[in-house]
Image (spheres, grey):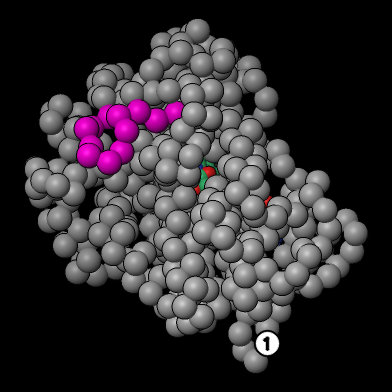
Amino acid sequence: MSASTPSDQPDVLIIGAGPAGAAAGYWLAHAGHHVVMIDRRSLPRGKACGGALTPRATHQLIDMGLGPSLDTWHRHVGITVAANERPVQLNWPTHPVFPPHGHVVRRRQFDQMVANHAVAAGAQLLEQHEAKEPIAERGFVRGAMVQSPGGRFAIRARYVLVADGGNSRFGRMLGTIRRADWPYALGARSYWETPRDCDDHLELGLDLHDRNGNVVPGYGWLFPLGDGTANVGVGVLSTAREFKSINPTHVLDNFARRVAERWDLDPSHPVGSIATGRIPLGGSVAPCAGPTFLVIGDAAAAASPFSGDGIGAAFETARIAADVLHEALTSDDATVLQRYPKLIDEQYGDQQAAGRLFARVVGRPALARELTRIVVHSRSLMEWSLRITTGMLRPDELGPAEAAYRAISLIARVAPGV
Ligand SMILES: Cc1cc2nc3c(=O)[nH]c(=O)nc-3n(C[C@H](O)[C@H](O)[C@H](O)COP(=O)(O)OP(=O)(O)OC[C@H]3O[C@@H](n4cnc5c(N)ncnc54)[C@H](O)[C@@H]3O)c2cc1C
């Protein structure tokens, strides 16, 4: 564990050292600022996650200088979509910025790698330090009261970055609220031994069922890790009619049985326990900025409402927030922070609106079945869908996927209740 209290008042106190907090710590320290990251747990720590890094997430890691370290993790070059036992293999779309590949990681080691990188850039990491409540001075947040094994003490800072994950208790204390009528996902995952651990395509199964055979909106995944195992899991959307009665662990059990033969795995014997977690989606948390604080990653519900991928969005929101804080610090102007919500809307607004509409549509079994039937019968529709749902639209040309996306997001932005 890193040492006790920070030596002098940091420019930025970051609450949470997951992907969002660690990336922000890296960018701020890299820019020369005094940063303290605190995490209530000690690293390495596990996290319920599929561990799939999209090309977009991979791009962020390369920009942070972590490209060479990524080579230790299994690489994938595309996705196999299996619906009704009809697998279709797609390579990642070409893109002028993002690489044509991604990786599958174990969060236990991966999160530590990113946090260590931030420390190497000059950030201070305090593990087993939990932010218990904000310090407010004349109405402005100026740090946090922190509980550590050595006792309770104050960390004061000019700015606070909230990166405390999906439950975001600290964020709630600052007044953030999750819109209860917007979709979220519940996920469950474990690891299974499989001889297909070196497959170079991720696999998604679009036909999820509960124990009674009812269709469940969401998808199952098999993400090969290249070490004799695959991360196998399911994500279930809250727009399902009987959502409250769906147990994601049961859905995972069912999914593992369905894929057991093709992946040569023993569904009754996962390696390790099943972990479950909630993924807030599509910008459902607001506000994401206050006069002296910003909110990033899952705490800001940054994950894609199409796929639930949140690691790339955690990195991206961290980088945008770090840029804003850098400008506020160098210009000595706190009002710069108010640009952050607009920057987030420019980056994700269309995707979030379209994704919320999508989540509502697939929450209706008949519509979801019809949509899946149409999409899986057309390779080009699947390629467009992959571009849209993984945020890999080309900024440099207006192809069919880009045109369809613009139309959908326009409709979604004006549709009532989306
Ligand atoms: C089942 C499941 C599968 C998923 N699969 C994928 C996937 O394959 N690919 C993908 O891109 N995304 C996936 N996600 C989403 C992804 O896990 C998250 O989007 C990502 O972890 C968000 O990073 P974060 O840093 O915002 O939050 P977190 O990773 O949750 O990190 C938050 C950190 O804050 C710390 N913390 C919390 N409260 C405090 C406090 N008060 N004081 C100090 N520290 C605190 C926590 O200990 C934690 O370390 C999945 C999620 C689930 C649940």
Residue 392: x %, y % from top left = 26, 42
Q: Is residue 77 left or right of residue 64?
A: left
| Viewer-closest of 123 and 242 | 123
| Viewer-closest of 322 and 85 | 322
* Quarter placement of the C terminus: bottom left
Q: Which residues are magenta?
A: 92-104
Q: Splitting the image into 4 quarters, where does residue 215 fall?
A: top left
Helix, strand, or loop for circle 1?
Answer: strand
The residue tagged 1 is: 137
The kind of residue tagged 1 is: Glu
| Viewer-closest of 98 and 244 | 98
Q: Residue furthest bottom?
A: 138
Residue 287: x %, y % from top left = 46, 74
Residue that appears at 15% across and 55% down? 406
Q: Is residue 260 left or right of residue 339?
A: right
Residue that appears at 54% across and 38% down? 49
Residue that appears at 72% across and 42% down? 43
Q: Magenta residues: mostly which secondary structure?
A: loop
Residue that appears at 41% across and 11% down? 262
- Examine the rendering and report whether any part of residue 203 can be seen: no
